[in-house]
Image: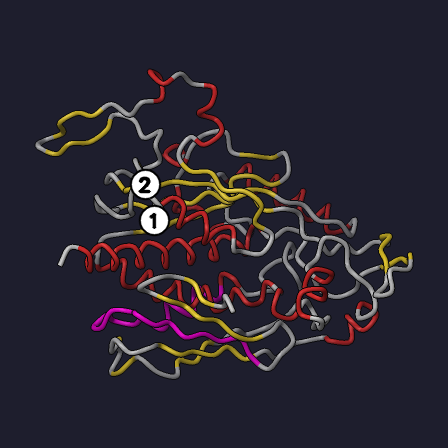
Amino acid sequence: MFNSFGNFLRLTTFGESHGKAIGGVLDGFPAGVKIDMDFVQAELNRRRPGQSRITTSRSEDDKVELLSGVFEGRSTGSPIGFLVWNKNQHSSDYSEMQSVYRPSHADYTYKLKYGIRDYRGGGRSSARETIARVVGGALAKLALRQLGMHITAYTSQVGAIRLEENYTAYDLSLIETNPVRCPDPEKAKEMEEYIYKVKEEGDTIGGVVTCVIQGVPIGLGEPVFGKLQAALASGMLSINAAKAFEYGEGFKGLKMKGSEQNDVFYNHNGRIETRTNYSGGIQGGISNGEDIYFRVAFKPVATVLMEQHTVNLDGQDTTLKARGRHDPCVLPRAVPIVEAMAAMTMLDYYLIDRMTQL
């Protein structure tokens, strides 16, 4: 159950970290969208392991194969099925973990809920499942392009190193020029060196990904249980290691008075706009046409390459020193995943709005 995401546009994913493949079925995708497979593969390449010295050394091509739903380069409106084969599993790295519960992992809860668990890399709870999300998100991005919507995410904080300004102060074209995916070159270098230092210590570190959605039409979202920010939060908090979500000014806005935070309306060349955007492009759960921006906090990766206390399956005290290839910080590879979940959410809510307007 609950292996699907979305309403009108619905992605169902399958596969495990050390199984034969990861795949998915994207249903409800509109017909006639030109499918650029080079773009889809490029999005997967942004997520794949082994990109730099600050990511896991697992080496995977992550080549996507479309199985259905595309004919002569365009979507047909039928379900789009796809696969990415796993080729570089080191399952033996996890043999010592089959009889113990790893601290802060899903091992304990998964075992108690289902009575069985795949200890090889976390099985279904592994972040490798996000491959399917990135494919679905890449396809959604292609559809959103035709609607004039663009989604950009970047690393805005690693540990205590953070960008102090909002997204309008940075050149977002610089995001892909460094392995951290941060638009500030100086901060990016600090972040990279810090992540590498943490990696050398066998430890991990968390941070924040900021996402901006531009070109959003007015009217997406519903005023009660279908609020657009709630849908975005649901998508973001379903990502592995995500711990918190805030949009607009979020917690920072609590320091402001209502008279200071209110986004005042004005007439801009015949179009009603707001002079500020503290609301983050959403008011009353509905998009108002301004940029939507939000932040997602990610915890440090739970797998640390140092000895930790834990218990075995019988509840007896023991110790565990994890092996394997793991990210010291999820932020660089989380950036395309955040974009993917945002893209599928926005396309889903666009399609919902279009259907309710008929």
Q: How many marks?
A: 2
Q: Which of the colour schemes (rainbow, by chain, secondary structure, one colour) is used?
A: secondary structure
Question: Residue at the left extreme?
Answer: 270
Identify which residue, 26 or 166, lies in the foreground: 26
Q: Amino acid at mark 2?
A: Gly
Counting from the top left corner in percent of width and height, residue 167 is at 40, 36
Q: Amino acid at mark 1?
A: Gly
Whether residue 192 is visible, yes or no, is yes
Counting from the top left corner in percent of width and height, residue 165 is at 45, 30
Q: Secondary structure at mark 1?
A: loop
* Magenta residues (range): 21-45
Counting from the top left corner in percent of width and height, residue 227 is at 34, 45
Question: Which residue lies at the image location 78% right of the left edge and 52% below the top edge?
Answer: 202
Asked if the residue under mark 1 is in contact with the one under mark 2, i.e. CB atoms within 8 Å, the reply is yes
Label 1 neighbour load within 10 Å: few <14, some 14-19, many 20+: some
Identify which residue, 265 or 41, lies in the foreground: 265
Whether residue 74 is visible, yes or no, is no
Label 2 neighbour load within 10 Å: few <14, some 14-19, many 20+: many
Counting from the top left corner in percent of width and height, residue 3 is at 49, 68
Residue 40 in magenta stretch: yes
Residue marked by disc 2 = 285
Question: Which residue lies at the image location 29% right of the left edge and 69% below the top edge?
Answer: 29
Relative horizontal placement of residue 98, taking residue 220 as reference (left or right): right
Residue 185 in magenta stretch: no
Identify which residue, 77 or 61, lies in the foreground: 77
Q: Secondary structure at mark 2?
A: loop
Residue marked by disc 1 = 226
Tell me how far mark 2 sits from mark 1, CA to CA.
7 Å
Question: Which residue lies at the image location 29% right of the left edge and 78% below the top edge?
Answer: 78
Q: Is residue 30 above or below residue 109?
A: below
